[in-house]
Image (cartoon, grey):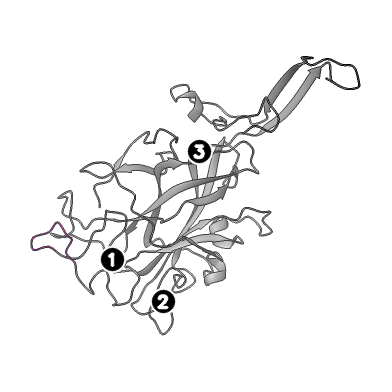
Amino acid sequence: MNSLLALDRLFTSAARPLLRTSALLLTVMSGGLLLIPEAAHAVVTGSCVQAQGGSSCTAGDVTFILVGLGTETDGCLTNSDTLSIRLGGQLQNTSANTRYDVGMYIYNNLGAESATAVSQGYAYNGSSCAREALRPAGTNNDQRCTFDSPAGSLNLLGGSGPFFNGDGDTCGDLLKVGTSTTCDSNADGKWDDSFFIFPTPVTLKCSDGTNGAADGFVDIPTCATWGQNANEIGTAGSCADENDVRPGTGAKCNCQNINSNVPSPRLALSCSCSPTTVRSGAGLSNGASTACTVTFANSLTCTPNSSTAERFRCGAASYLQFDTVAGTP
């Protein structure tokens, strides 16, 4: 278990909250705000889990909770729009044994999806996924964190590792569930979860309804993958990076359609002016004017939570602007 604390709202002056806390966590560390480190590499985009060897994803050994980091640079206006957000992954091994070379997949196809919708979600069978591995990995078989005495090499909760390394390669692993006197930041007698920050923002479609009826919030399909045995993932059994992470067998993945708390409206713009033509033809003087009415119709039907700030309610459009003077930003 870990010491992550869920908050209802955590955002910067230019951002809004990312994820609904009933399914996801907006987090701070027990000692203060979670800091986002400088990116060491870009998030890799490639095929999704089925194309990487997943065939059922029925195992539940590893739990992958998507975590919003409180920074969103844009928002949704329609369900064909996109948004870019900073994300992290909280990973927990719920099995009785160590799980190796853990991968995190987030569906990020921005175009039309040709795959058939399935219960596992599009991170399983979609055409494009962002993916990451737990990196860097710590010293082989070191089970002590930097705050332990004597100190070890691991930093499971900081977002950028090093993470547990049980097989000696360069991808991080998850130690088996059990009691522990090390890497136990909240003194609950259990090994901390691992928390990883995606090094660059992930751009997603503003899809709503992929996991059932549309409810006015963006759906984010995710999967976790892992190997059941050491030296099962990667070339010659050695995982090098996020390009290698995949299910060790067809079942060794856990997928879900996460319902976020990013509002997803369905706006349509209409504009009417009277008179409809201004300054047309010779002899018209400068200063002619017209009155225009701009209307945004939101076709989404949902039931807003009245206790939530208006801009964060289902189907709300918070990133809307239009020019009143042509050619101006």
Residue 160 picture quarter: bottom left
**Could you tell me which residue is drawn at 33 percent across and 53 percent down?**
37
Quadrant of the drawing holding the C terminus: top right
- Residues shaded magenta: 143-151
Which residue lies under the disc numbered 2? 233
Instruction: State yes or no: residue 115 in magenta.
Output: no
Q: Is residue 112 above or below residue 267?
A: below
Q: At numbered mark 2, what does the secondary structure look like: helix, strand or loop?
A: loop
In this view, the residue farthest toward the bottom is: 236
Q: Residue at x 24, y 47 (%)?
A: 3
* Foreground of the two, 195 or 202: 202
Question: What amino acid type is highlighted by mark number 1?
Answer: Ala
Displayed quadrant of residue 321: top right
**Where is mark 3, residue-wise?**
262
Q: Nearer the viewer, residue 312 or 74?
A: 74
Residue 29 position in % (x across, y down): 25, 45
Q: Amino acid at mark 2?
A: Ile
Image depth: mark 3 or mark 2 in front: 3
Magenta highlight: main SS: loop
